[in-house]
Image (cartoon, rainbow, N blue to C red):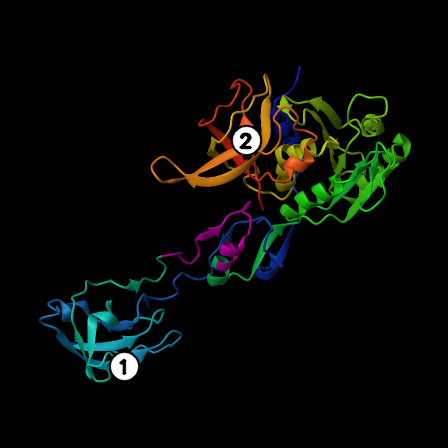
Amino acid sequence: MRTTVREHLSWILERVGVLPAEEVSLREAHGLTLAADVRARFSLPLWDNSAMDGYAVRAADVAGANADSPVALRIVGEVLAGSASDPHLGHGDAVRIMTGAPVPSAADAVIPVENTRGDRDDGSWATDSVLVQAAVAAGVNVRRRGEDIAEGSVLATAGELLGAARLAALAAAGVERVLVRTVPCVAVVVTGSELRGLGESLERGQIPESNSVLITGLLRECGIQTTEVHHSSDEAVSLADLLRELGERFDAVITTGGIGPGTHDVVRIALEAEPEVLATRVAVRPAKLQCAGRLSGGAFLFALSGNPVSAAVSFELFVRPALLAMQGRGEVRRITVPAVAAADWRGAEGVLQVLPVVVRSQAGPDGEAVLSCAPAVNPRGISHAVGGHGAANGYALVDADRGDVVTGETVPVILVAP
């Protein structure tokens, strides 16, 4: 009986564990995963500040202002962004103020400069007095202290990926260092006696090796730099020795090829002495053959099919989520989005079909932007179609009980373009 994709992923996630945490500076934290909540040291904004270039005023002083009956105010100072100045405003006073500058304590609103006339009537800023041509309510054009983030509030939570926007928010709130999970150290092992390196001459039956390029690239897209890539001979004893040695030095090991039931499927044979490694068949197409578990040396092993598209699908469904879980990521599965099928294709009876697709944005029936998807490979021969797979930027997920897909129907897709 075959297990489901969800069941196999759950089995993996229950066993991978979480890597240790370390403290790093904010500038070193991009692309890493938070290991603990972070609180704001400062309020955002730090003080009441102006949202406009204009004049800080007391709203009551300009309550009746309009273009036909402007209100004249005395200019008693100026506040620039970064200034500590806090000029006093009496009745009928105004202060020139720039965007981001602290609003004087006695002011409660800001009049945009375009709603005023200067005392020289030439479009320049007022120097001695200003004519206000529009009323303003208290609080208008004033960014209140802490209205974005209050001091001491949680600004980022454990399990978050630290991207550029989040790091900028932390920096603005005075955070200097954060606790993050370490990134998994991963080794890649490629098997297959028929494989030859790039640029090598090919004889009948031999093919260029591409899986190491595929897997290391997918790892980089997860923020992981592979430190070692091995091309193993099809000899089970030496491969078992290699896996044992790598298992002691790495957090994870990924192999490709040799996991089938054949008499020369070297990875399956080499792993027979590893009791915590599970070989199973999953109800998915492609990538039904799966092999994963803890090596005796300590690393978590992912043994993938040698067929490139099967290996890529396995990485997407099982390896990527597991590597994110090792880093303590709160969400390890990709978000699915709906897309309209731009072509018919045959489903895969009884299994989840994970079909490489080309996803594009197009105009919908009402002119709105919608996503469309079309197969990047022949749906009846997916696993080996490395050429067509190269154009794919997503995977359509067709449930086992859905059947064939018809043009115009909506299917869920996951977007995988970096």
Magenta stretch: residue 156 in it? yes
- Camera-side residue of 29 and 178: 29
Residue 20 in sight: no
Mark on residue 396?
A: 2
Please rate how many residues cluster around mark 2, counting C-alpha atoms within 10 Å: few if below 14, some from 14 to 19, many from 20: many
Q: Looking at the image, which residue sits at the far front?
A: 204
- Camera-side residue of 301 and 114: 114
| Residue in the picture at 76% in, 41% down | 188
What x and y, as percent, mark residue 306? 75, 32
Please rate how many residues cluster around mark 1, counting C-alpha atoms within 10 Å: few if below 14, some from 14 to 19, many from 20: some
Q: Mark 2 or 1 closer to N-term?
A: 1
Mark on residue 77?
A: 1
Q: Looking at the image, which residue sits at the far left?
A: 69
What x and y, as percent, mark residue 133? 16, 70
**Amino acid type shown at disc 2:** Ala
| Residue in the picture at 24% in, 62% down | 139
- Count how many numbered circles sit on residues in the image: 2
Q: Which residues are magenta?
A: 148-168
Mark on residue 10?
A: none
- Camera-side residue of 134 and 369: 369
What x and y, as percent, mark residue 36? 56, 49
